[in-house]
Image: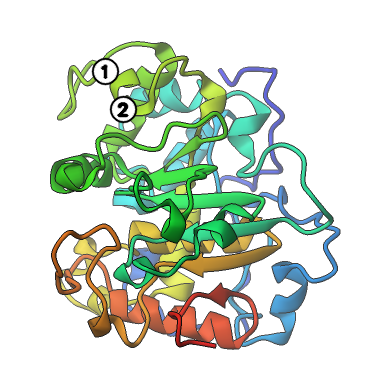
Amino acid sequence: RIPGSARAPALAAPEPVTRPPSRAPAVTLWPSLGDTYGQDRTYCNSTCPSSIRRRVAATEFRDIFLESIPVLQWAPHAREDEYRRLRRFTGAHGWKDVPWDVLRASLSLLNTSANGAMLEGGRRGPCVRCAAVGNGGILNGSGMGRAIDGHDYVFRVNGAVTEGFERDVGSRTSLYVFSTNTLMNSLRSYAADGFRHPPRTPETRYVFLPDHDRDYLLLQAAVSGQRVEQGRDKGTWPPGLFGAELRAAKFKMLHPDFVRYVRNRFLRADILATPRRALYRPSTGAVMLLAALHTCDQVSAFGFLTPDYEAYSDHYFDRTRKRVQFFANHDLRMEMRLWQRLRRSGLLQLYVGRKGT
């Protein structure tokens, strides 16, 4: 059962219908893309006169931006009708790879109001300002650390090394976004660069991008104070990752509707029209940045791919210069073009290097 103490968002019927935009991004090439979503109006009440939600109507994104898209999933979503709706979709886009008992046990633990909203606490003014920080080499030598830390909230992702790089990337982490897979890969790949665990500060909250049951099992173990009981990460001790004194309020989980919406409307890659379509999802950094754009009033992005990416190393923390790598499961060039479009539309402040304007 859903804990009665949790304040449920306004959820849609078992088969929610989102009206197709008047200028749809493209004809759906793969029937199971699922361009219909639930409803959640958590972020629709901003009083900021210059909020992204107020400005989007005057941009090219007006017909694809959904104000009421669910960004997070929590206890009120642990329902059998929702499970039937979302079990059609694989990976991060649904619950097909997650058994009902695992899903219910995990989401039911996210039963505080903090689990249902991305941003917590007071604000410094009428507009919530967020920094979304990627790990791109463009930040090395940037001196942007103070500007990043000056935002109300700071989002970081994957191998978020800050120690020794505070002048360039800052030291604060309000929201750390990851999947269990990307976290474990980052720990293996970037340990020598200083990434030995996710950021651990009093303000840090951990935001899962759930790719499959690994994420739900790790969440359940972390909130329950136990080791992971089954699966690929069996035996993993969550305090070794996230620190001591773990509690439900420290964790959030992105909704598969949101990840699917980002893929379908903002980052519909060509690979979706091929037999390799199941490999693809937007990168974790892209989902993080789009989540910030749907929950904050103003967003500044740092360390994301720019057209002159060949001038920089892959990561700001690289000890030797490395070329930017591209993989089939993400379309980083398409993401780069999206950041430029959002910048031109005035919806995103994008750091483009010291020579940029």
Report x, y in % for residue 75.
Answer: 56, 28
Which residue is drawn at the image coordinates 17% and 59% (left, top)?
319
Quadrant containing the N terminus in the rendered view:
top right
Q: Which mark is residue 241?
A: 2
Query: Dot 1: what SS?
Result: loop
Report x, y in % for residue 238.
Answer: 32, 21
Quarter of the figure with residue 118: top right
**Front in this rendered view, residue 278 or 328:** 328
Which residue is drawn at the image coordinates 34% and 60% (left, top)?
135
Amino acid carrying label 2: it is: Leu
Give the vertical position of 160 relative to 20 (above or below): above
Which residue is drawn at the image coordinates 30% and 34% (left, top)?
197
Crowd band around label 2 with a 10 angstrom C-alpha radius: few (<14), some (14–19), many (20+): some
Report x, y in % for residue 37.
Answer: 55, 57
Left or right of 189 on screen, residue 136: right
Quarter of the figure with residue 72: top right
Q: Which mark is residue 237?
A: 1
Which residue is drawn at the image coordinates 23% and 15% (left, top)?
229
Report x, y in % for residue 353.
Answer: 43, 79
Way the structure is coloured? rainbow
Crowd band around label 1 with a 10 angstrom C-alpha radius: few (<14), some (14–19), many (20+): some
Quadrant containing the C terminus in the rendered view:
bottom right
Q: Is residue 185 visible?
A: no
Give the vertical position of 82 relative to 150 (above or below): above
The image shows a total of numbered marks equal to 2
Amino acid carrying label 1: it is: Trp
Q: Is residue 67 visible?
A: yes
Could you tell me if the residues under marks 1 and 2 are in contact, i.e. CB atoms within 8 Å?
A: yes
Query: Dot 2: what SS?
Result: helix
Give the vertical position of 255 relative to 27 (above or below): above
Q: CA distance from mark 1 to mark 2?
A: 7 Å
Left or right of 180 on screen, residue 108: right
